[in-house]
Amino acid sequence: MSHPDDEFHPPTSDDPYWTETCWFSFQVPERRLSGQLYPYFQPNQGVCAAAAYFWDDHSDRPWDVLHAKNFWHLPMPDQPLSDISLPNGIRYRCLESQAVYEIAYDDPDGDEISVRLTSTAPSPDPTTSGPDTSISPVATAAQITLHGQEIGVDSFGFRDRSWGPRTQFGRGWATSATATPPRRSRTASTASCCTTTAP
């Protein structure tokens, strides 16, 4: 693709924690259901992680939500971000630069969980975007299958891109690419990273 923010950014240093992300979310308000697909790339280490989470108002804890699966230490893919398939079942295709994305997820363990999304994004919001971050609301049309039940999606979500050094200390992966956060206890950091408020 012609737009650099649809593709991987070359690391600007040899920092092992230089990180790039490409996160999509969607909601089904009438079901109080939310979902997110979150790949997390660390090219200087040659590894990535990839997560899929789906939850409703019955729980917001990773161990008893509808679906929570994170694959760690996957090999860094030799594919463009605009057309990528990951071993955890996430697939992204950019159909129109910075505008239309085809997103898919199939649980690799054979559970009856799959996602087919088409997300249409306006220009990134200048109030939440910067030189190393791009955040856009997206209008999402989709069909998902969750534990064998088919659910239509016609609502809004977000596309979030970030790239740059991201320390694993202090606030961990919640740290922005440029901020230097105060150190916090392990308990506080874990609560911040793992707790999501259901819609």
Image: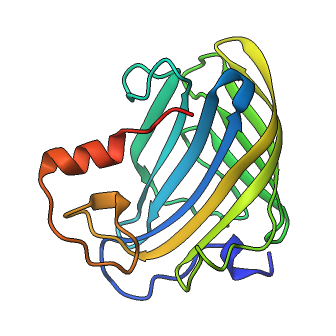
Give the quarter of the figure containing the C terminus: top right
Instruction: Give residue 106's position: percent from left, percent from top.
Output: 66, 31
Instruction: Looking at the picture, tell me which residue is in the foreground, 199 or 65.
Output: 199
Please report the residue visible at 83 percent of the width from the left and 71 percent of the height from the top: 97
Counting labels gives 0
Image-based side of 65 in relation to 6, left or right: left
Instruction: Looking at the picture, tell me which residue is in the foreground, 113 or 25.
Output: 25
Image-based side of 111 in relation to 143, left or right: left
Instruction: Give residue 105's position: percent from left, percent from top.
Output: 67, 36
Quadrant for residue 33, please give it: top right
Please report the residue visible at 55 percent of the width from the left and 59 percent of the height from the top: 77
Instruction: Give residue 66's position: percent from left, percent from top.
Output: 53, 20
- In the displayed structure, would residue 188 be above or below residue 145? below
Give the quarter of the figure containing the N terminus: bottom right
Image-based side of 185 in relation to 9, left or right: left
- In the displayed structure, would residue 8 be above or below residue 147? below
Instruction: Looking at the picture, tell me which residue is in the foreground, 8 or 180.
Output: 180
Please report the residue visible at 78 percent of the width from the left and 21 percent of the height from the top: 151
